[in-house]
Amino acid sequence: MIDEQTLERVVEFHGHMCPGLAMGVQAATIALREIGAHARDEEVVAVVETDMCAVDAIQFLTGCTFGKGNLIHRDWGKNAYSFYRRSDGRAIRISGRPDAWQRDPEHQELFARVRAGQASDAERARFEELHVAQARKVLGADPDTLYRLEEIPGPLPRKARIHATILCAECGEGAMETRVHRLDGRELCTPCFEAAMAPE
């Protein structure tokens, strides 16, 4: 369990307290226990299978970030996270247990009304109260009751690469060489390439 001061910093980083962020805190807690300390560079690599709130907690607590190249996103919509330790090749996958905790029906109903823009001020206030209460319930649970932990085989993800920048022949902006497209002998960034290929 992380201390309250660190939790406040995670919430500040993310923007609000919510159950998804709390799930990320719990996943990061397992990762730090099993894989080790905060990554200053690429000592630890995280592969996340979702883009939900949990990933912000994982970034903040483990030091795995997109900018350093040691946070890899797989757009699979799963509450699952793999962590690799480069020093010895150990790798684990943490995946959410489907029966880990029961959702509150009132919270879910209010969430739907808030998302649809149909909630009254009182309903919004009640939703926020329940939202934080659900998050606190997640934080109060044993992380091993929320997630399954398994050792996984390698290979380790490759180290982050630094690529050359190519200027787009259409807009003049620089793009990473691995993202440049050739069309009629011109090198184009992805948006310009897609615009050129769009039907008229």
Image: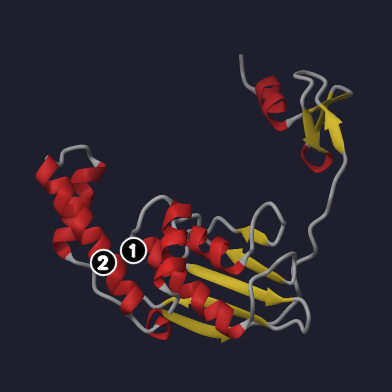
- Say left or right for 117 vs 123: right
Measuring from the top left, give residue 105's x and y in whole percent.
16, 63
Q: Are marks 2 and 1 in contact (CB under 8 Å)?
A: yes
Among numbered discs 2 and 1, the one appearing first in the sequence: 1
Identity of the residue furthest to the top in this view: 200
Picture quarter with the N terminus: bottom left
| Rendered location of residue 95, percent (x, y) | 48, 75
Q: Which SS class for mark 1?
A: helix
Q: Is residue 158 left or right of residue 45?
A: right
Please tell me whether residue 9 is drawn above or below residue 162 in the rendered image: below
Name the residue that disc number 1 marks: 19
Picture quadrant where residue 26 is located: bottom left
Left or right of 160 in this view: 1: left
Identify residue type, mark 2.
Gln
Tell me the element at label 2: helix
Q: How is the image coloured?
A: secondary structure
Residue 97 in the image: state x and y as whole percent. 39, 78
Binning the other alpha carbons within 10 Å of mark 1 as few (below 14), some (14 to 19) or many (20 upward) gives many
Circle 2 sits on which residue?
A: 134
